[in-house]
């Protein structure tokens, strides 16, 4: 039976960052995050973990406060599981596929899930990073951990590192942007019929230390590639900024809060934020954009709204299905 399963079932592993599943998990999650030297080097290597412990100890109470405002946990695992379920259903129309989920910094951890995949009799595995735009700090770190763990098991593995300009991914983003703009149009004050609301799109991407880009990381180039794909499909006035920086190094600029101030000073009034580097809701969308930036925008006289995250958007699921199928066919794992 095991051999039959091994031949027939193709595994798909979705990799994501992970997030605390309770307020008690915030401190160990932060420790795992700051222990990763591929994200940020905290002094010499032997001090990385002691400094990570110090940061997680001093910062966790404040961070717990943020999570308590969005339901007491990160929704990222629930959403990624829902994405996996929808993707598995879409793929099983074509072949026998089982989709797994693994996280980099909180359970289910990569080191927990890879043995589970092997024990399920799967010997052919496609690994899809849920970061559309490649960075060493995100996809790079997750795949590095995956390869370290997977090297102990006999499996054929194919890793998909980036898909920032996949047509269906772009189409899903265009759809949520159109819907977001429609909401602005419906809610605006009565005005002359021939006047459209002047909506500016603010693409807000997760920040990264500037040093990564200086050393050749393609992240910003990929972000701009995604935006370019969108701008070819829909006429928009757009800006790009970066959010969620942490740590005492130079980060990508402009930051989203600085960009909001700049746009307000230029007389912009309607801003639709697109969380461009995220494919699901978590603290960066639900707290940082929906609460922090929205309050800041109100103080600046701005009307700020956010597009819905892709989550289980049918076109996004179709994009992942297409990416997997093309990869499997190239490998000749199916006809």
Image (cartoon, rainbow, N blue to C red):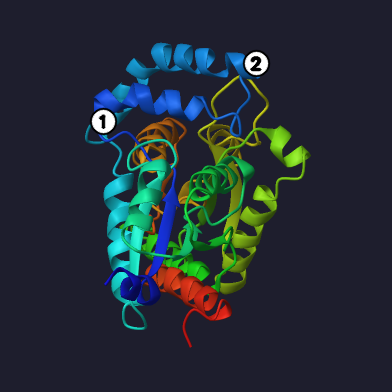
| Residue 62 position by quadrant | top left
Pointer 2 local density, CA inside 10 Å: few below 14, some 14–19, many at least 20: few
Q: Secondary structure at mark 1?
A: loop
Closer to the N terminus: mark 1 or mark 2? 2
Depth order, front residue of 15/132:
15
* Total number of numbered discs in the rendering: 2
Tell me: residue 1, above or below residue 292.
below
Residue 126 screen position, x and y as percent:
48, 64
Tell me: residue 332, above or below residue 164.
below
What residue is rendered at 42% in x and 56% in y?
14
Pointer 1 local density, CA inside 10 Å: few below 14, some 14–19, many at least 20: few
For the N terminus, the quadrant is: bottom left
* Residue wearing tag 1: 69
What residue is rendered at 43% in x and 67% in y?
178
| Residue 100 position by quadrant | bottom left
Depth order, front residue of 209/156:
156
What residue is rendered at 32% in x and 33% in y?
20
Depth order, front residue of 47/113:
113
68 sits left or right of 194 in the view: left
């Amino acid at each position: 039976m095991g051999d039959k399963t091994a031949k027939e079932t193709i595994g798909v592993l979705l990799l994501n960052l992970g997030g605390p599943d309770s307020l008690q998990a915030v401190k160990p999650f932060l420790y795992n995050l700051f222990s990763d030297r591929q994200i940020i080097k905290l002094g010499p290597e032997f001090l990385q973990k002691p400094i990570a412990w110090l940061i997680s100890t001093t910062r966790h109470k404040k961070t717990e406060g943020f999570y308590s405002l969005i339901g007491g946990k990160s929704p990222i695992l629930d959403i990624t599981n829902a994405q996996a379920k929808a993707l598995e259903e879409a793929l099983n129309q074509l072949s026998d596929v089982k989709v797994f989920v693994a996280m980099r910094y909180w359970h289910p951890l990569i080191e927990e899930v890879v043995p589970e995949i092997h024990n399920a009799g799967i010997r052919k595995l496609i690994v899809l990073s849920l970061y559309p735009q490649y960075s060493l700090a995100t996809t790079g770190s997750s795949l590095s951990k995956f390869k370290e763990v997977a090297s102990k098991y006999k499996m054929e593995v194919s890793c998909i590192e980036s898909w920032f300009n996949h047509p269906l991914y772009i189409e899903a983003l265009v759809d949520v942007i159109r819907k977001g703009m429609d909401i602005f149009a419906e809610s605006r004050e009565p005005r002359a019929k021939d006047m459209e609301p002047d909506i500016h799109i603010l693409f807000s991407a997760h920040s990264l230390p500037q040093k990564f880009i200086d050393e050749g990381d393609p992240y910003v180039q990929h972000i701009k590639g995604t935006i370019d794909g969108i701008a070819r499909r829909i006429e928009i006035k757009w800006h790009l900024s970066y959010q969620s920086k942490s740590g005492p190094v130079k980060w990508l600029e402009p930051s989203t809060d600085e960009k909001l101030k700049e746009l307000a000073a230029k007389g912009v009034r309607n801003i639709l934020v697109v969380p461009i580097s995220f494919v699901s809701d978590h603290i960066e969308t639900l707290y940082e954009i929906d609460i922090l930036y929205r309050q800041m925008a109100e103080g600046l006289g701005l009307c700020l709204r956010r597009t819905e995250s892709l989550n289980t958007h049918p076109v996004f699921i179709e994009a992942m299905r297409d990416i997997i199928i093309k990869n499997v066919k190239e490998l000749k794992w199916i006809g």
